[in-house]
Image (spheres, helix red, strand yellow):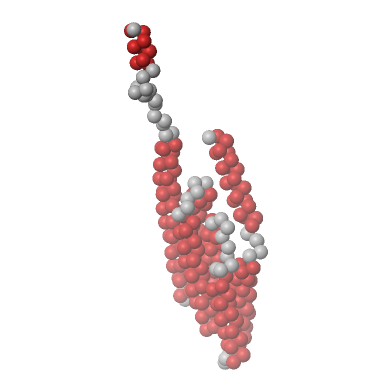
Amino acid sequence: MNGQQDDFQKESPFVTPTQPRPKNGNGNGERENGALRVVMLLISLVSLGIALVSGAVLAFQVLIGTNESKYDDIFYKIMAVGLAYLVGWIVALIGIRLYHNLVLPIFINVYAWITLSGIAILYIAIMRKLYQHGYSNTSFIKYAIIMAAMLIAFIGLHLLIEDHKLTFFAIPLLIINLIHLYLIVYHYIFGTVKEYSYLIGDALFFIGMSAVSVLMLMHLGILSGFRKTIDNLFDKNGNGAKANS
């Protein structure tokens, strides 16, 4: 009898065996990755924001500058702004491609539109300088350098976002290109111009900006090589991380 009772107690359906709770080993890793995404988001946005604001201030200084020797250090100032931009760009690239931050591309797209707005405003301000003939050869070179730096910054933001197209971004620039063309024709045909040598500056700036706008509109894949390099870099890192995990 005692043996049967022992067997009954062992096989009783009311006794549930205690099982160890499964340990969630990925919980700490997910929290750490989430915190890291937030930190990288803040670093990239602050660094890029500082770079964009500093670039706008530098462009304003060049446009209103009357003393030619005052802004001979423009390259050093661009290097300082570029350093902040580079830090923000690298952190944003790692956050988007390696840690798959889904919020950061939204802010980068907003920054791209802000940068495009700055390019449009700068273009209009330079058009005004060209129309008034109130510039020297040195000033014209500085205008071109500032515009090129802003275009490079805009293209850099474009490269951060996967499957990001520049077609729609080209429309505002094309409209300003047409306005510039019409002003050139009106100014040198119907206006009272005494020095036609300034037409060279107008033509060079118009051709350069028109070429950039058309290339953006046509989407010929000129930047595909840079994108493939970035993709290959992070694909290798991703495969290596999976192999080690």
Q: Position of residue 141 (x, y in %)?
A: 57, 71
- Left or right of residue 203, residue 55 in this image: left
- Left or right of residue 139, residue 16 in this image: left
Q: Nearer the viewer, residue 55 or 13?
A: 13
Q: Is residue 11 above or below residue 201?
A: above
Furthest residue toward front: 1
- Left or right of residue 209, residue 50 in this image: left
What residue is at 39 percent from the left and 26 percent from the top?
A: 20
Looking at the rendered image, the quarter that the N terminus falls into is top left
* Residue 141 can be seen in this image: no
Q: Position of residue 9 (x, y in %)?
A: 34, 16
Q: Position of residue 182 (x, y in %)?
A: 59, 84
Q: Is residue 104 above or below residue 25?
A: below
Q: Is residue 131 above or below residue 160?
A: below
Q: Nearer the viewer, residue 176 or 199?
A: 176
* Residue 217 can be seen in this image: yes
What residue is at 45 percent from the left and 54 percent from the top?
A: 103
What residue is at 43 percent from the left and 52 percent from the top?
A: 41
Q: Nearer the viewer, residue 215 or 141?
A: 215
Q: Position of residue 3 (x, y in %)?
A: 36, 8
Disc tally is 0
Task: Choose top left, top right, bottom left or bottom right for residue 202.
Answer: bottom right
Q: Is residue 130 above or below residue 88?
A: below
What residue is at 41 percent from the left and 48 percent from the top?
A: 39
